[in-house]
Image: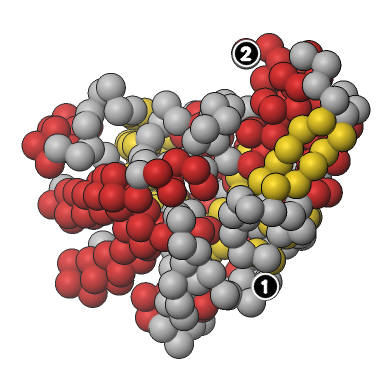
Amino acid sequence: MEKTLSMKVLITGATGFFGKHVTKALQPHFQLFCVGRRDFDLLDPARADAMFLEIQPNIVVHLAAKVGGILANKSYPAEFFYKNMLITANIWELSKKYAIDKLIYVMPGCAYPKNAKSPIKESSLWDGYPDEFPAPGALAKKMGVAAAYAYRQQYGLKSSIIIPANMYGEFDNFNEYDSHVIPALISKMHKAKNNNVKKLTLWGSGNAVRDFIYAEDVAKCIPHFITNSIEFECENPSLKSVCNISSGTGYSIRELANLIGEIVGFSGEIAWDLSKPEGPSNKVFDNSNMKKLKLDCTTCLQDGIRRTYEWYCKNY
């Protein structure tokens, strides 16, 4: 892809985990404007408006969100709902106001119904309620799908909606309180190894199956959505521009823990606390639409975790 300096691309949430990967992936090709919370508070409509007025973007890659793991979502459900709903509404309205060419919207896979059958297709997005704990924040983010349809119908605003599987990689949040499963396990096992802990207790049964994908691979797909018009055949018109980015392969949390333990060098016993939540039993995403676009995410889980752990060791 040739460098397109005439195309101004605004990345919200650029200082976050995935934002850093997206910035790296887009840097060679576009004129980037990377903003984080310290630059513009997107909860404040006036500050969000000032951001659009100052940058005058052609493309918006919207990544900014209130995110966290099971414990954080369980502890602060109203905060997750309010902040994600307000940010989502502000970005869509201002994208219309400033007549951008296209909005790329990234939303979490936890927005899918709790009982969605794996491999989960984009067409199942409206078929039920999400898992209990992330539901408030996930539903707020899910309103971006409704917004995409509404703003396309009324104003002709083009958009693509990307739903990655469980992303992990460098720059992730390794705080055990509000991190996702891979960074949390890396942090716990690294500390347990260094402290010579003989037994480590993890949440749930270890039997829940998840779909993990290396964040750098997902970020490398973003340019395709910027430069191409994406629309799939779908009975529900609100879902025509929605695309999973997924490995299409499931791993149990037990398998994941064993793999991370091997990479980190933790040789102690792993116990499972059945009283703690673990979410849906099986959550693997269908990647048929992604394959139709000839996109691929090639980093295997073992290599991706090894790179992530190497980064963790250098930065923590």
- Which residue appears at 80% of the width and 49% of the height? 254
State which quadrant residue 261 falls in.
top right
Q: Is residue 311 left or right of residue 112?
A: right
Kind of residue indicated by mark 2 = Asn
Query: Seen in the image, is 156 located left or right of residue 302?
Result: left
Q: Is residue 52 above or below residue 273?
A: above
Q: Which numbered disc flags the more N-terminal residue, 1 or 2? A: 1
For image coordinates 67% across by 20% down, the residue present is 312
Whether residue 106 is visible:
yes
Q: Where is residue 40 drawn, in percent x and y?
A: 22, 29
List the residue tagged with mark 1.
118
Q: Element at badge 2?
A: helix
Q: Residue 77 appears at what percent x and percent y?
A: 35, 50
Q: Is residue 58 left or right of residue 111?
A: left
Residue 73: x and y in percent read 43, 47
Does residue 302 appear in the picture of this structure?
no
Q: Quadrant of the N terminus?
A: top right
Q: How busy is the neighbourhood of tag 1: few (under 14 within 10 Å), some, or many (20 plus)? A: some
Q: Nearer the viewer, residue 12 or 266?
A: 266
200 relative to 135, above or below: above
For the image, the number of numbered tags is: 2
| Element on which disc 1 rests | loop
Pointer 1 with pointer 2, Cβ within 8 A: no
**Residue at left 63%, top 34%?**
184
- Residue under label 2: 315
Image quarter in which the C terminus is found: top right
Type of the residue with mark 1: Ser
Q: Residue furthest front?
A: 275
Q: Nearer the viewer, residue 33 or 42?
A: 42
Give residue 149's mark.
none
